[in-house]
Image (spheres, rainbow, N blue to C red):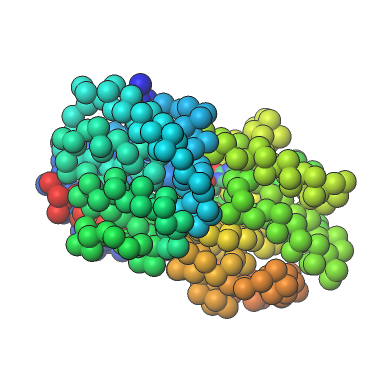
Amino acid sequence: MLSLVSVPPKNINLYKNLVKQSLLKEIKSVSKKLQKKKIIFINSTSQGGGVAEIMQGIIPLMQGLKIDAQWFVIPPNKEFFNLTKQIHNALQGKPFAFKKQQKDFYCQYLKKVASQMSNMEADLWLIHDIQPLGLISFLPNIHPVISHIHIDTSNPYVPVWDFIKTFLSKYDRIIFSNKNFIHQGLAKNRIKIFPPGIDPLSKKNKKLDLAKAKKILSKVGINTKKPLISQVSRFDPWKDPLGVINIYRTVQNKFPDVQLALVGIFLAKDDPEAEKIYQQVKNKVKEDKNIFLFSNLKQLPKDVDLDIFINAIQTGSDVIIQNSKKEGFGLSCTEAMWKENVVVARPVGGLKIQIQDKKSGFLAENPKQMAQQIIRILENPDLKKKLGRAAKQRVQERFLIIHLLRNYLKLFNELI
Ligand code: UDP
Protein backbone atom coordinates (compact mmCIF):
# COMPACT_ATOMS: atom_id res chain seq x y z
CA MET A 1 0.00 0.00 0.00
CA LEU A 2 1.05 3.58 -0.50
CA SER A 3 1.62 5.36 2.77
CA LEU A 4 0.29 8.78 3.62
CA VAL A 5 2.89 11.17 5.05
CA SER A 6 1.26 13.48 7.58
CA VAL A 7 2.50 17.02 7.97
CA PRO A 8 0.81 19.89 9.84
CA PRO A 9 -0.56 22.88 7.85
CA LYS A 10 1.46 26.10 7.87
CA ASN A 11 0.32 29.69 7.40
CA ILE A 12 1.92 31.53 4.51
CA ASN A 13 1.83 34.82 6.43
CA LEU A 14 4.71 33.51 8.50
CA TYR A 15 6.89 34.33 5.50
CA LYS A 16 5.85 37.96 5.23
CA ASN A 17 9.22 39.33 6.29
CA LEU A 18 11.15 37.06 3.98
CA VAL A 19 9.58 37.68 0.58
CA LYS A 20 7.90 40.54 -1.23
CA GLN A 21 4.35 41.36 -0.22
CA SER A 22 3.34 41.16 -3.89
CA LEU A 23 4.48 37.54 -4.08
CA LEU A 24 2.31 36.53 -1.12
CA LYS A 25 -0.61 38.41 -2.64
CA GLU A 26 -0.16 36.61 -5.93
CA ILE A 27 -0.06 33.24 -4.16
CA LYS A 28 -3.24 33.96 -2.21
CA SER A 29 -4.95 34.99 -5.40
CA VAL A 30 -3.93 31.94 -7.46
CA SER A 31 -4.76 29.61 -4.59
CA LYS A 32 -8.43 30.71 -4.47
CA LYS A 33 -9.57 28.52 -7.32
CA LEU A 34 -7.72 25.58 -5.81
CA GLN A 35 -9.32 25.68 -2.36
CA LYS A 36 -10.80 22.31 -1.37
CA LYS A 37 -9.35 20.75 -4.50
CA LYS A 38 -7.62 17.48 -3.80
CA ILE A 39 -4.09 17.25 -5.09
CA ILE A 40 -2.16 14.04 -4.61
CA PHE A 41 1.64 14.08 -4.66
CA ILE A 42 3.51 10.78 -4.99
CA ASN A 43 7.21 10.09 -4.53
CA SER A 44 9.40 7.26 -3.30
CA THR A 45 10.71 8.26 0.14
CA SER A 46 9.53 10.45 2.99
CA GLN A 47 13.06 11.18 4.21
CA GLY A 48 16.51 11.72 2.76
CA GLY A 49 17.27 13.61 -0.42
CA GLY A 50 15.90 16.71 -2.07
CA VAL A 51 12.39 15.59 -3.07
CA ALA A 52 11.43 14.63 0.48
CA GLU A 53 12.81 18.00 1.61
CA ILE A 54 10.64 19.85 -0.92
CA MET A 55 7.54 17.90 0.07
CA GLN A 56 8.06 18.64 3.75
CA GLY A 57 8.09 22.32 2.90
CA ILE A 58 5.39 22.57 0.24
CA ILE A 59 2.56 20.34 1.52
CA PRO A 60 2.04 22.27 4.80
CA LEU A 61 1.89 25.56 2.89
CA MET A 62 -0.70 24.26 0.42
CA GLN A 63 -2.77 22.90 3.29
CA GLY A 64 -2.49 26.28 5.01
CA LEU A 65 -4.06 27.77 1.88
CA LYS A 66 -6.97 25.32 2.28
CA ILE A 67 -5.90 23.18 -0.63
CA ASP A 68 -6.41 19.51 0.11
CA ALA A 69 -2.82 18.54 -0.70
CA GLN A 70 -1.85 15.00 0.26
CA TRP A 71 1.53 13.31 0.11
CA PHE A 72 1.92 9.57 -0.49
CA VAL A 73 5.01 7.40 -0.90
CA ILE A 74 5.07 4.17 -2.86
CA PRO A 75 5.87 1.00 -0.88
CA PRO A 76 9.62 0.36 -0.60
CA ASN A 77 11.13 -2.66 -2.29
CA LYS A 78 14.86 -3.35 -2.41
CA GLU A 79 14.95 -4.95 -5.83
CA PHE A 80 12.75 -2.23 -7.33
CA PHE A 81 14.85 0.60 -5.85
CA ASN A 82 18.06 -1.13 -7.03
CA LEU A 83 16.64 -1.06 -10.52
CA THR A 84 15.28 2.52 -10.35
CA LYS A 85 18.67 3.75 -9.08
CA GLN A 86 20.25 2.19 -12.19
CA ILE A 87 17.64 3.89 -14.36
CA HIS A 88 18.33 7.17 -12.53
CA ASN A 89 22.07 6.76 -13.18
CA ALA A 90 21.44 5.97 -16.85
CA LEU A 91 19.27 9.07 -17.25
CA GLN A 92 22.22 11.07 -15.94
CA GLY A 93 24.40 9.48 -18.62
CA LYS A 94 25.78 6.19 -17.28
CA PRO A 95 25.45 3.33 -19.79
CA PHE A 96 23.14 0.56 -18.60
CA ALA A 97 22.27 -2.67 -20.38
CA PHE A 98 18.56 -2.51 -19.60
CA LYS A 99 17.18 -6.01 -20.09
CA LYS A 100 13.62 -6.84 -21.14
CA GLN A 101 13.20 -8.75 -17.91
CA GLN A 102 14.08 -5.59 -15.92
CA LYS A 103 11.68 -3.46 -17.95
CA ASP A 104 8.97 -6.01 -17.22
CA PHE A 105 9.81 -5.96 -13.53
CA TYR A 106 9.58 -2.13 -13.42
CA CYS A 107 6.14 -2.32 -15.02
CA GLN A 108 4.90 -5.26 -12.96
CA TYR A 109 5.88 -3.63 -9.67
CA LEU A 110 4.08 -0.40 -10.56
CA LYS A 111 1.10 -2.33 -11.87
CA LYS A 112 0.82 -3.93 -8.44
CA VAL A 113 1.10 -0.55 -6.72
CA ALA A 114 -1.52 0.89 -9.10
CA SER A 115 -3.90 -1.95 -8.25
CA GLN A 116 -3.84 -0.73 -4.63
CA MET A 117 -4.84 2.78 -5.68
CA SER A 118 -8.29 2.10 -7.06
CA ASN A 119 -9.96 3.95 -4.16
CA MET A 120 -7.79 7.07 -4.55
CA GLU A 121 -9.32 10.07 -6.26
CA ALA A 122 -7.98 13.56 -6.87
CA ASP A 123 -8.52 16.71 -8.93
CA LEU A 124 -4.85 16.70 -9.88
CA TRP A 125 -1.86 14.42 -9.47
CA LEU A 126 1.84 15.20 -9.25
CA ILE A 127 4.34 12.36 -9.57
CA HIS A 128 7.97 13.01 -8.60
CA ASP A 129 10.87 11.46 -10.51
CA ILE A 130 11.14 8.10 -12.18
CA GLN A 131 10.40 5.60 -9.41
CA PRO A 132 6.59 6.08 -9.58
CA LEU A 133 6.62 7.51 -13.14
CA GLY A 134 5.30 4.36 -14.81
CA LEU A 135 2.13 4.29 -12.66
CA ILE A 136 0.51 6.34 -15.41
CA SER A 137 0.34 3.29 -17.67
CA PHE A 138 -1.86 1.45 -15.18
CA LEU A 139 -3.98 4.39 -14.08
CA PRO A 140 -5.21 5.85 -17.36
CA ASN A 141 -7.77 8.03 -15.57
CA ILE A 142 -5.47 10.06 -13.37
CA HIS A 143 -5.68 13.28 -15.33
CA PRO A 144 -4.64 16.02 -15.09
CA VAL A 145 -1.27 14.62 -14.05
CA ILE A 146 2.14 16.25 -13.82
CA SER A 147 5.56 14.62 -13.78
CA HIS A 148 8.23 16.54 -11.87
CA ILE A 149 11.72 15.38 -12.85
CA HIS A 150 14.51 16.45 -10.52
CA ILE A 151 17.56 14.91 -12.16
CA ASP A 152 19.87 16.08 -14.91
CA THR A 153 18.53 14.43 -18.08
CA SER A 154 20.50 16.65 -20.48
CA ASN A 155 22.63 13.81 -21.78
CA PRO A 156 20.94 10.53 -20.92
CA TYR A 157 21.88 7.04 -22.01
CA VAL A 158 19.50 6.94 -24.96
CA PRO A 159 18.04 3.39 -24.76
CA VAL A 160 16.95 4.08 -21.19
CA TRP A 161 15.64 7.55 -22.09
CA ASP A 162 13.54 5.96 -24.83
CA PHE A 163 11.94 3.62 -22.30
CA ILE A 164 11.23 6.46 -19.85
CA LYS A 165 9.96 8.72 -22.62
CA THR A 166 7.07 6.36 -23.34
CA PHE A 167 5.73 7.12 -19.84
CA LEU A 168 6.65 10.81 -19.83
CA SER A 169 4.71 11.42 -23.00
CA LYS A 170 1.50 10.33 -21.25
CA TYR A 171 1.75 13.22 -18.74
CA ASP A 172 -0.12 16.49 -19.20
CA ARG A 173 2.87 18.50 -18.02
CA ILE A 174 6.51 17.73 -17.23
CA ILE A 175 8.51 20.00 -14.94
CA PHE A 176 12.30 20.24 -15.20
CA SER A 177 14.43 22.58 -13.12
CA ASN A 178 16.62 23.58 -16.04
CA LYS A 179 15.89 24.08 -19.73
CA ASN A 180 19.08 22.22 -20.64
CA PHE A 181 17.60 19.04 -19.16
CA ILE A 182 14.94 18.69 -21.85
CA HIS A 183 16.00 15.79 -24.00
CA GLN A 184 14.60 15.02 -27.45
CA GLY A 185 11.18 13.61 -28.10
CA LEU A 186 8.94 15.52 -25.67
CA ALA A 187 6.10 17.82 -26.71
CA LYS A 188 7.41 21.34 -26.03
CA ASN A 189 4.01 22.76 -25.04
CA ARG A 190 3.80 20.32 -22.14
CA ILE A 191 7.10 21.33 -20.56
CA LYS A 192 7.52 23.73 -17.66
CA ILE A 193 10.80 24.96 -16.27
CA PHE A 194 11.19 26.18 -12.72
CA PRO A 195 13.61 25.46 -9.87
CA PRO A 196 12.76 23.96 -6.49
CA GLY A 197 13.35 25.91 -3.29
CA ILE A 198 14.21 25.64 0.39
CA ASP A 199 12.09 26.44 3.41
CA PRO A 200 13.80 29.33 5.24
CA LEU A 201 11.72 28.65 8.37
CA SER A 202 12.51 24.96 8.75
CA LYS A 203 14.78 23.81 11.57
CA LYS A 204 17.40 23.08 8.97
CA ASN A 205 17.41 26.60 7.58
CA LYS A 206 16.40 28.88 10.43
CA LYS A 207 19.17 31.14 11.68
CA LEU A 208 21.48 29.35 14.08
CA ASP A 209 24.09 31.43 15.95
CA LEU A 210 27.60 30.70 14.85
CA ALA A 211 28.58 30.06 18.48
CA LYS A 212 25.76 27.51 18.88
CA ALA A 213 26.67 25.87 15.58
CA LYS A 214 30.28 25.53 16.68
CA LYS A 215 29.24 24.08 20.02
CA ILE A 216 27.32 21.35 18.20
CA LEU A 217 30.29 20.66 15.94
CA SER A 218 32.63 20.37 18.91
CA LYS A 219 30.27 17.79 20.44
CA VAL A 220 30.99 15.45 17.54
CA GLY A 221 34.76 15.89 17.87
CA ILE A 222 35.38 18.64 15.31
CA ASN A 223 37.98 21.17 16.45
CA THR A 224 36.30 24.53 15.92
CA LYS A 225 39.60 26.40 16.15
CA LYS A 226 40.81 24.70 12.99
CA PRO A 227 39.42 25.25 9.46
CA LEU A 228 36.57 23.00 8.36
CA ILE A 229 35.33 22.20 4.86
CA SER A 230 32.18 20.13 4.41
CA GLN A 231 30.02 18.43 1.84
CA VAL A 232 26.43 17.59 2.83
CA SER A 233 25.24 14.95 0.37
CA ARG A 234 24.13 11.36 0.13
CA PHE A 235 27.05 8.95 -0.44
CA ASP A 236 26.42 8.75 -4.15
CA PRO A 237 28.75 8.41 -7.14
CA TRP A 238 27.36 11.62 -8.74
CA LYS A 239 28.26 13.63 -5.63
CA ASP A 240 31.84 12.32 -5.95
CA PRO A 241 32.83 12.16 -2.26
CA LEU A 242 36.07 10.35 -3.22
CA GLY A 243 37.01 13.39 -5.30
CA VAL A 244 36.28 15.63 -2.28
CA ILE A 245 38.96 13.77 -0.33
CA ASN A 246 41.54 14.49 -3.06
CA ILE A 247 40.62 18.18 -2.98
CA TYR A 248 40.91 18.22 0.82
CA ARG A 249 44.38 16.65 0.55
CA THR A 250 45.47 19.42 -1.85
CA VAL A 251 44.13 22.06 0.58
CA GLN A 252 46.15 20.32 3.31
CA ASN A 253 49.38 21.35 1.55
CA LYS A 254 48.56 24.94 2.45
CA PHE A 255 46.50 24.36 5.61
CA PRO A 256 47.93 21.23 7.27
CA ASP A 257 45.34 21.31 10.06
CA VAL A 258 42.28 21.59 7.79
CA GLN A 259 39.39 19.25 8.62
CA LEU A 260 36.81 17.68 6.32
CA ALA A 261 33.26 16.60 7.15
CA LEU A 262 31.26 14.43 4.74
CA VAL A 263 27.65 14.26 5.90
CA GLY A 264 25.42 11.67 4.24
CA ILE A 265 23.17 10.03 6.80
CA PHE A 266 21.56 6.90 5.34
CA LEU A 267 17.86 7.70 5.25
CA ALA A 268 16.66 7.58 1.67
CA LYS A 269 14.93 4.25 1.13
CA ASP A 270 15.20 4.69 -2.62
CA ASP A 271 19.02 4.91 -2.59
CA PRO A 272 20.55 1.45 -2.22
CA GLU A 273 24.01 2.58 -3.43
CA ALA A 274 24.93 4.64 -0.36
CA GLU A 275 26.44 1.82 1.70
CA LYS A 276 28.80 0.76 -1.12
CA ILE A 277 30.04 4.29 -1.78
CA TYR A 278 30.42 4.91 1.95
CA GLN A 279 32.71 1.85 2.21
CA GLN A 280 34.84 3.16 -0.67
CA VAL A 281 35.12 6.53 1.09
CA LYS A 282 36.03 4.85 4.37
CA ASN A 283 38.79 2.86 2.67
CA LYS A 284 40.22 6.01 1.19
CA VAL A 285 40.10 7.97 4.46
CA LYS A 286 42.13 5.30 6.30
CA GLU A 287 43.35 6.65 9.63
CA ASP A 288 42.99 10.37 8.91
CA LYS A 289 41.70 11.87 12.17
CA ASN A 290 40.84 15.15 10.46
CA ILE A 291 38.17 13.59 8.26
CA PHE A 292 34.73 13.12 9.81
CA LEU A 293 32.23 10.84 8.11
CA PHE A 294 28.60 10.95 9.16
CA SER A 295 26.42 8.15 7.86
CA ASN A 296 24.37 7.15 10.89
CA LEU A 297 21.97 9.10 13.08
CA LYS A 298 23.52 7.44 16.12
CA GLN A 299 26.68 9.49 15.58
CA LEU A 300 24.81 12.68 16.45
CA PRO A 301 24.67 13.98 20.03
CA LYS A 302 21.47 12.88 21.80
CA ASP A 303 20.07 16.40 22.09
CA VAL A 304 20.73 17.33 18.43
CA ASP A 305 18.41 16.18 15.70
CA LEU A 306 19.49 15.74 12.08
CA ASP A 307 18.09 19.03 10.77
CA ILE A 308 19.85 21.03 13.47
CA PHE A 309 23.05 19.10 12.84
CA ILE A 310 22.91 19.88 9.10
CA ASN A 311 22.21 23.51 9.99
CA ALA A 312 25.25 23.52 12.30
CA ILE A 313 27.49 22.04 9.59
CA GLN A 314 26.28 24.48 6.94
CA THR A 315 26.58 27.43 9.35
CA GLY A 316 29.80 26.47 11.11
CA SER A 317 31.95 25.22 8.22
CA ASP A 318 34.47 27.68 6.77
CA VAL A 319 33.72 26.53 3.23
CA ILE A 320 31.09 24.23 1.73
CA ILE A 321 32.00 22.05 -1.19
CA GLN A 322 29.57 20.58 -3.71
CA ASN A 323 31.60 18.32 -5.91
CA SER A 324 28.71 16.83 -7.92
CA LYS A 325 29.50 15.60 -11.44
CA LYS A 326 25.80 16.03 -12.29
CA GLU A 327 23.22 17.82 -10.19
CA GLY A 328 19.51 18.22 -10.93
CA PHE A 329 19.43 21.24 -8.64
CA GLY A 330 21.31 20.70 -5.39
CA LEU A 331 19.27 21.89 -2.42
CA SER A 332 22.30 21.31 -0.18
CA CYS A 333 24.01 24.11 -2.04
CA THR A 334 20.95 26.40 -1.68
CA GLU A 335 20.81 25.69 2.06
CA ALA A 336 24.45 26.64 2.56
CA MET A 337 24.08 29.79 0.44
CA TRP A 338 21.07 30.81 2.51
CA LYS A 339 23.33 30.65 5.58
CA GLU A 340 25.73 33.11 3.93
CA ASN A 341 28.30 30.41 3.49
CA VAL A 342 30.45 30.16 0.39
CA VAL A 343 29.93 27.10 -1.79
CA VAL A 344 32.69 25.95 -4.10
CA ALA A 345 31.00 23.78 -6.71
CA ARG A 346 31.49 22.20 -10.07
CA PRO A 347 29.82 24.16 -12.89
CA VAL A 348 27.10 21.58 -13.57
CA GLY A 349 23.28 21.46 -13.79
CA GLY A 350 21.48 23.28 -11.01
CA LEU A 351 24.68 24.40 -9.29
CA LYS A 352 25.46 26.56 -12.30
CA ILE A 353 22.05 28.18 -12.01
CA GLN A 354 22.43 28.93 -8.33
CA ILE A 355 25.99 30.18 -8.07
CA GLN A 356 27.20 33.15 -10.08
CA ASP A 357 30.93 32.49 -10.23
CA LYS A 358 33.03 34.82 -8.02
CA LYS A 359 29.88 36.75 -7.08
CA SER A 360 27.75 34.45 -4.95
CA GLY A 361 30.19 31.52 -4.63
CA PHE A 362 32.72 29.77 -6.81
CA LEU A 363 32.38 27.45 -9.77
CA ALA A 364 35.56 25.48 -10.35
CA GLU A 365 36.28 23.30 -13.38
CA ASN A 366 38.71 20.81 -11.85
CA PRO A 367 39.97 19.57 -8.47
CA LYS A 368 43.05 21.83 -8.57
CA GLN A 369 40.94 24.94 -9.14
CA MET A 370 38.51 23.80 -6.49
CA ALA A 371 41.31 23.50 -3.93
CA GLN A 372 42.65 26.92 -4.97
CA GLN A 373 39.28 28.58 -4.42
CA ILE A 374 38.86 26.88 -1.05
CA ILE A 375 42.30 28.15 -0.01
CA ARG A 376 41.37 31.63 -1.20
CA ILE A 377 38.33 31.69 1.06
CA LEU A 378 40.18 30.26 4.03
CA GLU A 379 42.78 33.03 3.63
CA ASN A 380 40.32 35.83 3.11
CA PRO A 381 37.44 36.24 5.61
CA ASP A 382 36.31 39.51 4.00
CA LEU A 383 35.85 37.81 0.66
CA LYS A 384 33.86 35.10 2.41
CA LYS A 385 31.56 37.69 3.97
CA LYS A 386 31.00 39.46 0.66
CA LEU A 387 30.25 36.32 -1.33
CA GLY A 388 28.14 34.90 1.51
CA ARG A 389 25.91 37.96 1.60
CA ALA A 390 25.40 37.80 -2.17
CA ALA A 391 24.65 34.08 -1.91
CA LYS A 392 21.89 34.65 0.63
CA GLN A 393 20.37 37.41 -1.46
CA ARG A 394 20.33 35.19 -4.52
CA VAL A 395 18.43 32.47 -2.66
CA GLN A 396 16.07 35.01 -1.14
CA GLU A 397 15.15 36.34 -4.57
CA ARG A 398 14.72 33.05 -6.43
CA PHE A 399 15.11 29.77 -4.59
CA LEU A 400 12.78 29.79 -1.58
CA ILE A 401 9.89 27.36 -1.16
CA ILE A 402 7.55 30.33 -1.62
CA HIS A 403 8.77 30.79 -5.19
CA LEU A 404 8.20 27.11 -5.88
CA LEU A 405 4.73 27.35 -4.32
CA ARG A 406 3.79 30.21 -6.66
CA ASN A 407 5.01 28.27 -9.71
CA TYR A 408 3.20 25.09 -8.69
CA LEU A 409 -0.09 26.90 -8.02
CA LYS A 410 0.02 28.77 -11.31
CA LEU A 411 0.55 25.50 -13.13
CA PHE A 412 -2.26 23.79 -11.19
CA ASN A 413 -4.59 26.64 -12.16
CA GLU A 414 -3.74 26.03 -15.78
CA LEU A 415 -4.77 22.39 -15.48
CA ILE A 416 -7.78 22.39 -13.14
N1 UDP B 1 20.55 15.84 3.58
C1 UDP B 1 20.21 15.43 4.85
N2 UDP B 1 21.07 14.64 5.52
C2 UDP B 1 22.26 14.25 5.02
C3 UDP B 1 22.61 14.66 3.71
C4 UDP B 1 21.71 15.46 3.02
O1 UDP B 1 19.16 15.79 5.38
O2 UDP B 1 22.99 13.55 5.71
C5 UDP B 1 19.60 16.71 2.88
C6 UDP B 1 20.17 18.04 2.45
O3 UDP B 1 20.22 18.94 3.57
C7 UDP B 1 19.20 18.45 1.35
C8 UDP B 1 18.86 17.11 0.72
O4 UDP B 1 19.17 16.11 1.69
O5 UDP B 1 18.05 19.03 1.91
C9 UDP B 1 19.67 16.84 -0.53
O6 UDP B 1 19.09 17.48 -1.60
P1 UDP B 1 19.90 17.74 -2.94
O7 UDP B 1 18.96 18.39 -3.89
O8 UDP B 1 21.16 18.49 -2.62
O9 UDP B 1 20.36 16.31 -3.44
P2 UDP B 1 19.60 14.92 -3.73
O10 UDP B 1 19.86 14.06 -2.54
O11 UDP B 1 18.17 15.21 -3.95
O12 UDP B 1 20.30 14.38 -4.94
In the picture provided, is 259 more to the left or to the right than 193?
Answer: right
Coordinates of residue 405 in the picture (x, y in percent): 30, 52
Residue 184 in the image: x percent, y percent? Answer: 32, 63
Percent x, y of residue 268: 53, 37
Count up the numbered dots: 0
Residue 229 is left or right of residue 207, and the answer is right
**Residue 295 in sight:** yes
Can residue 310 be seen in this snapshot? no
Q: Is residue 97 above or below residue 44?
A: below
Specify the quadrant that holds the N terminus: top left
Horizontal side, residue 290 vs residue 70: left or right: right
Q: Is residue 53 left or right of residue 372?
A: left
Q: Splitting the image into 4 quarters, where does residue 57 fall? A: top left
Q: Is residue 348 above or below residue 81?
A: below
Q: Front-most of 276 and 2? A: 276
Task: Tell me the residue at 76%/61% (across/down).
Answer: 246
The answer to whether 309 is drawn above or below residue 324 in the figure is above
